[in-house]
Image (cartoon, rainbow, N blue to C red):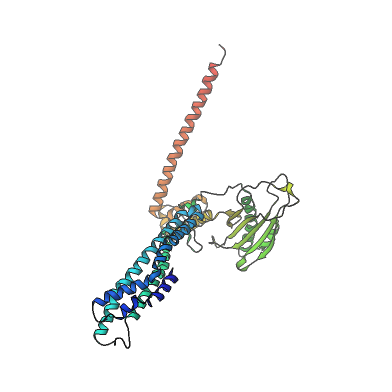
Amino acid sequence: RLLVRLGGLYVYHFDPVAAPRVLLLDPTKHKSIKKYFKFAKRLGQGGDMRIFVKTVKPFTRTLRIFVGGWRWFEAAPCRRSEVGLEETMAFIGNRVSRMFARSATDFIAYYLFLPFQRYLFRQDILSYPTEYHPIALCVFIGIVRAVSPYAASFQGSRLGRVLTRHFFASEKNRWMPVQRIGELNLMSDDCQEKDEVDQNSDLVIIARTVAKALGTVQEGNNHVDGEETKVVRQYEALMDEGFHQVGAGSGGYAVYQYHVRFNKQAPVQSALFLLHVTPYGPSITDVMPYYIVLEHETSFDHRGKWSQQTSWHGPSVLEGYCYQGAFFSPHHFAELKEMYDKQLLAYESACKKLPTIAKTHRTGVPRDLPTLKKFLEAGKRNRKRNKNNREFNELHKVVTSVAKQIKLLINKEKRNQISGGRSHAPK
């Protein structure tokens, strides 16, 4: 559409009917400003091609709405509201920026450029028509009026998308690649994981085996001074579990292949797995976790072995973190890290208040788990401590009421059994 407008502009400013009228106008008169502006506006609309542009405009706009709707349709279910609002804001930004650019160009041309040109002619600063002719400014205004809506529409769409993304990012619904754990909203839909993987699925069972092997690597590499520990290499620990390394990359990235022979008692054991391992994630107790991705290789050739085709339980791709021999899903590891940071902060605060705590609470350095819990509780803020006490009391009330109901049901069942036995007893 822009090329059609520019082509129509080029043809129209040579028009044998409209161009001579503009050439005969007196640029020093005030009435000429309106006629110059009308000619420049007609140039920006594409001249005689504006009818064609108006005809194809509904089609291009419908196509844009269709593309935005398709982006909403193919988005993940948890992101459809965000993508839909993003496309709506982009469309609104596109339309508003076009109207603003067109109106701003008309306003500046009619109230600034053309009156200033008239002033220069009246002061004899510009000589007409030997050195300069007003039609040059009309062509310039026409080009700007044709190009500015398209240039502004790109920025308007971008602004609409950026505002929407920042709006959703302010709610902290996602764990971004670079983000503090404390900034994560654990009550968001993504962290609640409504589609949590079944803990008995096949890949979760394999991931636990991988986490156990990688746990020996972390324990061996983080040895205590003065103690002799055996350094366990990653590929050696995984090789003992049946994983064979097939690739590697920068930053400790490695790829392993896991192929289990067919076994009729275990329906999962007739598949090929790929394991991607890299040290990545926030460290806990100065130990960096391993980020793993397990995938079931579906392109494995089973021709000639149709009897080994078995059912598959669970997803075909699984991602998570391995830390100290345990496997965590991303949101569970985020909760673990957040809880660790809170407890560490409470411990540091309690250490700073140790002389006061020893006098008021009659407890010194923690010696066992009960004293450690009291020590950490003393390091928390009063508001947090009172909130924990309220939550504990509310939970205790609920547990007590449920226990009473269970006891009543048990006693009622016993009475029914005794009365039933008496009614069926021989007279």
Does residue 363 appear in the picture of this structure?
no
Where the C terminus falls, by quadrant?
A: top right
The residue lying at 43 percent from left, 45 percent from top is 392
- Residue 236, how many percent across, how many down? 69, 61
Residue 138 occupies quadrant: bottom left
Rendered location of residue 160, percent (x, y)? 41, 63
The answer to which of 22 and 59 lies nearer the viewer is 22
Q: Is residue 11 visible?
A: yes
Q: Residue furthest right?
A: 304
Q: Quadrant of residue 99?
A: bottom left
Which is nearer the eye, 304 or 37? 37
Task: List x then y, in percent, for residue 148.
Answer: 38, 71
Q: Residue at left 53%, top 20%?
A: 420
| 212, 201: nearer the viewer | 201
* Quadrant of the rendering where the N terminus is positioned: bottom left
Q: Residue furthest top?
A: 427
Tell me if 180 is positioned left or right of 226 in this view. Answer: left
Q: Position of residue 316 (x, y in %)?
A: 62, 52
In this view, 237 is above or below 388: below
- Residue in front for this viewpoint, 372 or 36: 36
Q: Could you tell me how many numbered marks the image carries?
A: 0
